[in-house]
Image: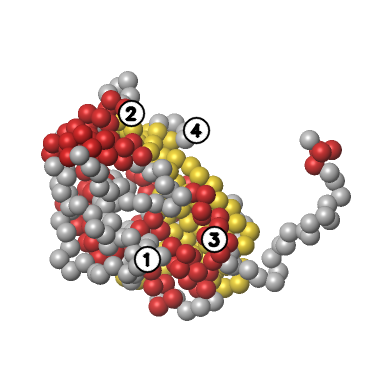
Amino acid sequence: MAFISLTSRTRLLLRSQPFRTFATESPSSFAPKAAPYQVFDRNAKRMQKDRAVSRDAGVRSRTVDYVREEVAERLMERLMDIKRKFDTIVDLGSGPGHMSKLLDPEKTRKVIMIDSSEQTLNRDPDEEFEVEVERVNADEEALLDILPRNSQEAVMSCLSLQWVNDLPGVLVQVKESLKPDGLFLAAMFGGDTLFELRTALQLAEVEREGGISPHISPMTDTKDMSNLLSRAGFTLLTVDIDEVKVEYPSIWELLDDLRDMGESNSVLGRRHIISRDTLTAASAIYKEMHGTQEGNIPATFQVIYMIGWKPAPNQPKPLERGTGETSLNEVL
């Protein structure tokens, strides 16, 4: 059994699945040349997402929606705390629309879903959405090629920004696309995501191959997000961190699910093959270091939630330093 362990929530039984072997993604024959700031092969990531949806006509892709669906629900809770109705909301890096499906007519009239993978974007029919849907197949890194400046009331993103090469640049584009007092609401994987898998693979490679190579994509440090949002020009910032923990029978089921999620490694210069011997060693190390009493292994997905607003003259402003009338010493 693989089940999800949610912070301060009841454990939810997900599904049982048979043992499956792990097949690594094949390299892209037409991968783009790396620019100085590039970390990820965006074309390879698009192909990974396309393949994930094409397997079994998308059935396996739907089976592994559990992490995105949970994060989308937590992101929707934050949106519902904002007492405002939006005419249109942009879902950046929408995938099949995990977040968009939760929107209702009381919150917005229409959602614009943008994703680089056309197959993922069109996986689910319009009947599964409660609001009007417009789908745009485009690269999330070129947002201003899609949306005019000062045109949107709200932009949201659910577990897509961790694959962006120029994250500061994308945040600036989001801010530019928003109208004054426009909302940016997003969730992305943080730097401690899959730390158990990372350590197991590194130790196994040192033992069996005498060195290590990156198999888990580098992710943004949680401490940096407030600075990045501030530098992009957002105000009234809120950044918080949460975790979603999932348990699997072994490393093999975890790797299979990551592949079916379209979350395989896409770092430029990555190794495309991990030997069976190294994976077997990693499986044993994983269970020894992190295994549960039930014989399962946990996988931690650290999620950074962020809220920012485009500046506007009518927004609340912090008081000037020294204008307070009550001392904190008196309160405490």
Q: Identify the mark at residue 37; answer none if there is no mark.
A: 1
Q: Quadrant of the N terminus?
A: top left
> Callout 2, which amino acid?
His
- In the rendering, at what x and y percent does residue 243 appear? 44, 40
Residue beneath disc 2? 290
Mark in the foreground, 2 or 1: 1
Tell which circle, 4 or 2, labels the residue nearer the N-terminal end: 4
Indicate whether 108 appears above or below 298.
Answer: below
Please tell me how crowded label 2 is: few (under 14), some (14-19), or many (20+) other residues with Cα within 10 Å. Answer: some
Q: Secondary structure at mark 1?
A: loop
In the foreground, 263 or 191? 191
Residue 27 visible to the viewer: yes
Q: Quadrant of the C terminus?
A: top right
- In the rendering, at what x and y percent does residue 315 appear? 69, 65
Asked whether the beta carbons under mark 4 and mark 2 sit within 8 Å of each other, the answer is no
The answer for how far apart the CA atoms under marks 3 and 1 are is 19 Å
Please tell me how crowded label 3 is: few (under 14), some (14-19), or many (20+) other residues with Cα within 10 Å. Answer: many
Mark in the foreground, 4 or 2: 2
> Callout 3, which amino acid?
Leu
Please tell me how crowded label 4 is: few (under 14), some (14-19), or many (20+) other residues with Cα within 10 Å. Answer: few
- Place residue 118 in its image quadrant: bottom left
Q: Secondary structure at mark 3?
A: helix
Q: Secondary structure at mark 4?
A: loop
Mark in the foreground, 4 or 1: 1
